[in-house]
Image (tube, rainbow, N blue to C red):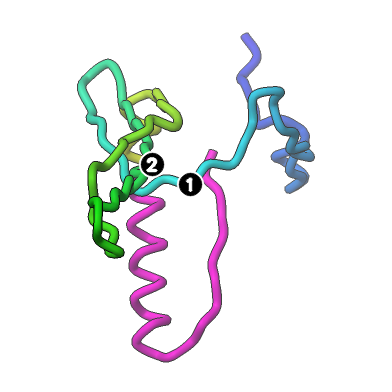
Amino acid sequence: MKRKTKSAAKRKGKVPKIEVTEGSGFRPVYASGVFGGLDPNDGRLIFFLDRLKPSVKKGKTVMELSKVEREMQVEVHMSPNQFMSVAKWMNEHVRRLGKKAKSGKKESSTSYIG
């Protein structure tokens, strides 16, 4: 029986090319908040946008907050392992941003997990 070995690409230190494309439903969204949770079967994040709706009372020239409309933007489901990986990834970005803020640097940091 032959023993399994690492793929030729891994043995030679080559990493397969990753081609990034946008799906037909891809769209950037702004979120003012998120809710969701994690259970043994599913991680769920629901991003929302709060819209402030003002009103002006008769005879007054001052606007007051009438209501807040919470508009759901996107719901993301993932495995519990991926959910925990995303949480760790986000915490690392928060930690780096905190360090940069203390040092006065204004660099941004973008990376991915997958």
The residue under label 2 is: 49
Instruction: Describe residue 55's horizontal placement relative to residue 15 as left or right.
Output: left
Instruction: Please identify the quarter of the rendering in which residue 67 is found.
Output: top left
The residue under label 1 is: 30
In this rendered view, identify the residue nearer to me: 45 or 69: 69
Element under disc 1: loop
Q: Residue furthest front?
A: 59
The residue lying at 30 percent from left, 20 percent from top is 42
Instruction: Describe residue 17's horizontal placement relative to residue 42 as left or right.
Output: right
In this rendered view, identify the residue nearer to me: 65 or 93: 65
Instruction: Describe residue 40's horizontal placement relative to residue 107 as left or right.
Output: left
Prevalent SS, magenta region: helix
Mark 1: few/some/many CA within 10 Å (<14, 14-19, 20+): few
Residue 76 covered by magenta stretch: no
Q: Position of residue 83 (x, y in %)?
A: 35, 34
Residues shaded magenta: 86-114
In this rendered view, identify the residue nearer to me: 53 or 75: 53
Q: Position of residue 7 (x, y in %)?
A: 71, 30
Instruction: Please identify the quarter of the rendering in which residue 1 is found.
Output: top right
Instruction: Please identify the quarter of the rendering in which residue 26 is found.
Output: top right
Q: Position of residue 28 (x, y in %)?
A: 59, 41
Q: Position of residue 54 (x, y in %)?
A: 31, 50
Q: CA distance from mark 1 to mark 2?
A: 7 Å
In this rendered view, identify the residue nearer to me: 110 or 64: 64
The residue lying at 26 percent from left, 36 percent from top is 35
